[in-house]
Image (cartoon, rainbow, N blue to C red):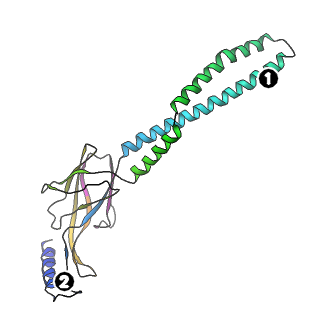
Amino acid sequence: MMRNLVFAVLLFGLLAACDPCEDCGASLVFEPTVEMIFVNADSLKDIRDSLGIIAFNDSALASNSFILDTLQDRIEEIDLILATMDSALLELEKAEILNVSVPMRKADSALFAELNKDADSISQLFTQAITTINSGSVELENVVIVENEATIPFTDSATSWNFPLSFDGKFSTYTFDISDESFLIQLDYENFTEVDEERNVLIRARDLTLIDTLGFDSVDVCERNCFDGNATFTFYF
């Protein structure tokens, strides 16, 4: 690693010694980055559970409406029969339907209708929330590099985050908050140098590996071609 850094410094010095012109001179990119995405899996579960309750209430309401229609049809059948003959059993059945079954089903329908009040608009909001959460849109707070206590100035919400990696391997651990919950991420990687088409000397990172976390439920890690600019880690909390 030290040999690579010495090589990079010497190469940068040689390039910078060129006569001023549009084609010579080089800039040094000090720190590579790694992309991270954060998904609120707990909120996703809560929202999906709520959508499941809405779907159940909607199904129950439809079922009660169907049964009420069936009871009404049966009453009409009984009335047609009673118009031509007397039947104590049919009279009892009709009374049971009118006095017990119909009131019970109407009460259930009223309950499920109240529970599902504004269900369409609520479902739409929940669906939009799922899309937002799945996109990884969150706001990170108090992002700190542990090794040097430096603060990373993230200010707005984003769907992915590029965390800086040390050009000399001096830091690899980050802490931060999301909605008053604290998290930690620790990475391992190997630095190397390369010169791009514009003759910029780049310090890059490869073999990016997640070695420790705190506060997350699960993680999707980079498994192949884990270079800076190519590696993405998705954290679920």
| Above or below 131: residue 207 | below
Q: Do tag 1 and tag 2 residues touch (Cβ < 8 Å)?
A: no
Q: Is residue 120 left or right of residue 206?
A: right
Q: Nearer the viewer, mark 1 or mark 2?
A: 2
Vertical side of 65 occupied by 137: above or below: below
Q: CA distance from mark 1 to mark 2?
A: 96 Å
| Residue 221, visible in the rendered structure | no
Give the position of the N terminus as an image quadrant.
Answer: bottom left
Q: Residue at x 26, y 79 (%)?
A: 196
Q: Where residue 6 sits: x, y (%)?
A: 12, 76
Left/right of residue 123 with respect to residue 154 in the rendered view = right
Q: Give the magenta-colored segment's residue range.
A: 210-237
Secondary structure of the residue carrying numbered label 2: loop
**Which amino acid type is marked by label 2?**
Gly
Please, which residue is most extreme toward the top here?
A: 88
Q: Which residue does the image show at 66% across and 15% down from the upper left?
A: 99
Which residue in the protein does label 1 denote? Answer: 77
Q: Residue 146's quadrant in the figure?
A: bottom left
Q: Which residue is mark 2?
A: 25
Q: Nearer the viewer, residue 121 or 217?
A: 121
**The furthest residue to the right:** 84
